Amino acid sequence: MEKNDKERLDVIWNKGQVVKGYNEKCYRKDACGAWMIREKYGDRTSPFGWEIDHIYPKSKLSESTSDVSLIDDVKNLRPLNWKNNESKGNDYPSYQAKITSDGNKNVEGVYEYTVNEETQKIIEQLFKSKLC
């Protein structure tokens, strides 16, 4: 994604899980339960760094379509701890994560996740016949 202005980042950040007792403007969890810190966007040196994940990867779009502009639609984007984004790669709907949390700490391991059914329906509607 080329355009990561503050407003767009805020919209994506707000898709992260709010945790009671923590300032939601600063701290959230990703879809795998890993902690992220808002100011650590793009920081791969921090265990709390996060990136923008394309839920449905561009590489999975049918090669017969030239309309890949929807890949950066906010419906297809979410915040993900950078280690989880790296391990997810181009997998969909099931993928592997490397980080989750235990209390207020991130813990490493190997975890299997599947994009929830509601999100899968949104993705299917967004891309309609363009999915492989």
Image (cartoon, helix red, strand yellow):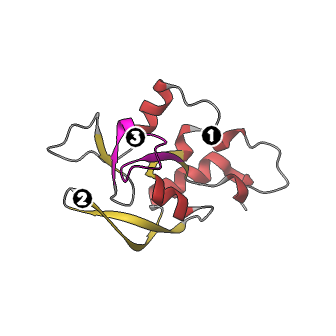
Report if residue 19 is visible in the image.
yes
Q: Which residue is mark 2?
A: 105
Report helix, strand or loop for mark 2.
strand
Q: Earlier in the sequence, mark 3 or mark 1?
A: 3
Image mark for residue 40: 3
User: Would residue 18 appear left or right of 113 to someone viewing this image?
Assistant: left
Report helix, strand or loop for mark 1.
helix
In contact (CB < 8 Å): disc 3 and disc 1: no
Report if residue 14 is visible in the image.
no
Report helix, strand or loop for mark 3.
helix
What residue is drawn where x is 63% and y is 38%? 1
Judging depth in this view, the residue of 29 and 63 nearest the camera is 29
What residue is drawn where x is 73% and y is 62%? 132
Residue type at mark 2: give it. Lys
Q: Residues within 10 Å of mark 2 (few under 14, many from 20)?
A: few
Q: Earlier in the sequence, mark 2 or mark 1?
A: 1
In contact (CB < 8 Å): disc 2 and disc 3: no
User: Would residue 129 appear left or right of 31 to someone viewing this image?
Assistant: right
Residue type at mark 3: give it. Lys
Range shown magenta? 35-52
| C-alpha distance separating marks 2 and 1 | 31 Å
Q: Which residue is mark 1?
A: 72
